[in-house]
Image (cartoon, helix red, strand yellow):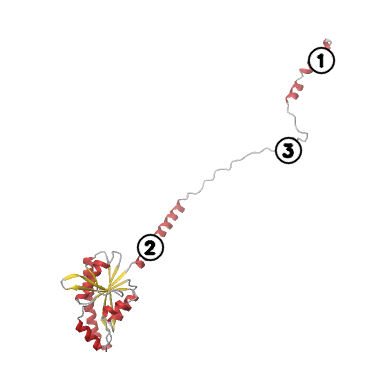
Amino acid sequence: MTTAQLYHCFKKLSDPSRIMARGRSRLPINFCPNLIRTRIHFRSPTLHSKPESPKIEMDQVDGTEANVCCNHELTIKKEETRRKVMVVVDSSQEAKTALHWALSSAVQPDDIVVLLDVIKHSTIGENSERAGRGAEENRLLHAMKSICQAKRPEVHVELSLVEGRERGPTIVEAARKQGISLLVIGQKKRSVTLQLLMIWAAGGKTVGDTAEYCVQNATCMALAVRRKSKKGGGYLITTKRLKDFWLLA
């Protein structure tokens, strides 16, 4: 190879355009620079939201009202579910005995004690006499209420004065209307002679007193209570299934 040929080959090898062409990557045949899309991401400007304090305050108000309504409903339900114990009272010692027994043995702290007294039905011409009896019975009811408050101050006491021709049916009807759960009434001890006289007067039929009538006809549980003896010795309880069941206290 001559000197001129060597020079020509060296010139071709040292050509810058050829060197750059060798270093370039091969592009596809259908490549078009105009189809190149530049993706530019724009950040949206920060929006200043309004303070939510009014909404929170409204939620707090709504929550407070809801709590008040809920507490009110619970109070009503609690009042509806509280048990009512009715004690029939009058001026007799047996009525006081029944009241003392009920307060010590039957009444619970959440119960409502209803003190019931019955006055006989009177005609129109006996209005003045009926008013006098009503005032006397009211004083008796308040005196019995004082006994309840002294012995069981945590118990709620209600007073009820009703009028009726017959004492037994009037008591049973009053207990039914007021939704009573337990009816307690004092019972007198009758001698054998008195029982025979009452049977004879009724034409041979067995006649019970007011307490026995209430025990047998009341729609709720009814108890007739009396002392076993004047000296003490506990109580005798009569129900529909038990008669003179002895309790020491």
| Residue type for callout 2 | Leu
| Residue type for callout 1 | His
Mark before the other along the chain sequence, 2 or 1: 1
Would you say the residues marked 3 and 2 are in contact, meaning their CB atoms lie under 8 Å apart? Answer: no
Q: For the residue labelled by badge 3, is the local secondary structure a helix, a strand or a loop? A: helix
Q: Is residue 107 left or right of residue 31?
A: left
Q: For the residue labelled by badge 1, is the local secondary structure a helix, a strand or a loop? A: helix
Residue receiving disc 3: 35
Which quadrant of the figure has residue 174? Answer: bottom left
User: Which residue is located at x 30 percent, y 68 percent?
Assistant: 112
Judge whether residue 74 can be spotted in this image. Answer: yes
Residue 74 got which mark? 2
Residue nearer the viewer, 207 or 89: 207
Residue receiving disc 1: 8
Q: CA distance from mark 2 to mark 1?
A: 110 Å
Extreme-top residue of the structure: 3
Percent position (x, y) of residue 151? 22, 66
Judge whether residue 145 can be spotted in this image. Answer: no
Q: Is residue 51 left or right of residue 232?
A: right
Q: Which image quadrant: the N terminus?
A: top right
Q: Which image quadrant: the C terminus?
A: bottom left
Residue nearer the viewer, 64 or 145: 145
Q: CA distance from mark 3 to mark 1?
A: 41 Å
Mark before the other along the chain sequence, 3 or 2: 3
